[in-house]
Amino acid sequence: MRIAMVTDYYLPTLGGVQTVIKAHREALEHDGHEVTVFAPLAAPSSDPGIVRLPTARGFAPDGYPFTWTPSSAADVLRVELHRRRIDVVHVHTEMFAALAGFEAARDLGIPVVQTMHGRIDVYTRSVLPLPSVTTALLAGMHRRRMSHDRAHIDPRAPYARDRTARRMWRLMVSQANHAAQVIVPSAHFAAKLVAQGVRTPVTVLSNGLEATVLDEIGEPAVRRPAAGEQLRVIWCGRLSPEKRPEVFVDAIAAVQGVTADMFGDGVARTVVRRRIESVAAGRITVHGAVPQARVLEAMRDAHVLVSSSLDFDNQPMVILEAIAAGLPVIVADPDLAESLPPDGGVVAPTPDAAGVAAALSALRDAPEEIARLSAGAVRHRSRIAQTTHRDALLEVYRAAVRPATR
């Protein structure tokens, strides 16, 4: 099968979407399929499997290259999809690269599979300046290229009570309803999408890690900290409000006998550094944006990973990486419990800093519990390999193609 992956974010920028696409591509190509990635790039790529979409100059929201114009991107896609005889277009985002992918696929009669990776209602509110204005502009440009008539948002849902949130939910639901098939990595996000009007067939399909990442991690060792040993904790993600890094900082500050490393960069970097200097100076090291290999190395040396986001993340890839490394995980968001293996992680008693601190304190005082959770993560390792989910992904592609070939 010949597959086009269309995305607004790709390597070498860092993030969960980029990691997922990399894992999909590796697993599919290993199975003999042809995969081409279409994305805006900060610089040309020598990889023949990557096609650079027209990219804005001097404009990179949150540090990411930005597809511009959508019409030019659609022109490139039409030519390349036809030339490469693509069977299915797999769209991974909701911005202009994605819209161009839908337009070109429609013009050529190629089915589209859409993966809904995350909550852009929360992301845009946290990252864009003047979100009440900028989301209106974004939604308006999106609506001009893709009808929003198929979306009827229920304003009673707690996450859709304000106008800005409903605007972004209408965008997400509309795009999903224009696809032939929809993939969602978590049941909790899939349920929200269906509740808000997604009528396209939805498949809940976990993300996975590629073989090269599992090989780089190696065989994980069960963590067995000594009694009284400092608890080594890591946090990894965008330094951005929707990830709530300050909650993590405040939790570390509240617990003695704990040191922490933070990996990532973003719009909240200055706020986070100032908060650390104020409440946890000398106990938290911020490393900024680093290659995936550096994060994996840190995971091998840590005792626990903390995810502090709430009502935003779908299925963070960093949690899967931690599991592969045999690293216990603490999540603040109860929805993320479905990403944790049995006996491999902990949900904080409350999602605030006090709840995360309580979970950290309990593990600091019970090294045998860390060993038990680590062993649970190690037992689950094989289930998060991308090869485990490859056949299910291919079946979604086949389901999308079948109606187009009747």
Image (spheres, rainbow, N blue to C red):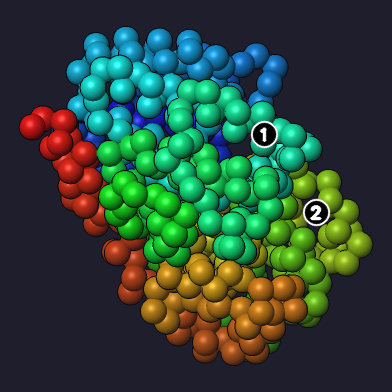
Q: Which residue is mark 2?
A: 272
Q: Residue at x 86, y 63 (%)?
A: 281
Residue 228 horizontal side relative to residue 333, left or right:
right
**Percent coordinates x, y for residue 96 in the rendering:** 52, 25
Amino acid on which disc 1 is placed: Ala
| Residue 136 tag number | 1
For the point 42% across and 81% down, which residue is it? 343
Seen as rendered, the residue at the extreme right is 278
Q: What's under tag 2, amino acid-wise?
A: Val
Q: Secondary structure at mark 2?
A: helix
Does residue 275 sit above or below 356 in this rendering?
above
The quarter of the displayed image where residue 290 is located? top right
Q: Position of residue 118 (x, y in %)?
A: 51, 49
Residue at 59% in and 63% down: 156
Q: Residues within 10 Å of mark 2 (few under 14, many from 20)?
A: many
Sequence-wise, which precedes: disc 1 or disc 2? Answer: 1
**Residue 221 sits in quarter:** bottom left
Side of 84 where 71 appears, left or right: right
**Which is more foreground, mark 1 or mark 2?**
1
Taking 188 as reference, is 384 left or right? left
Measure the alpha-carbon separation of dots 1 and 2.
29 Å
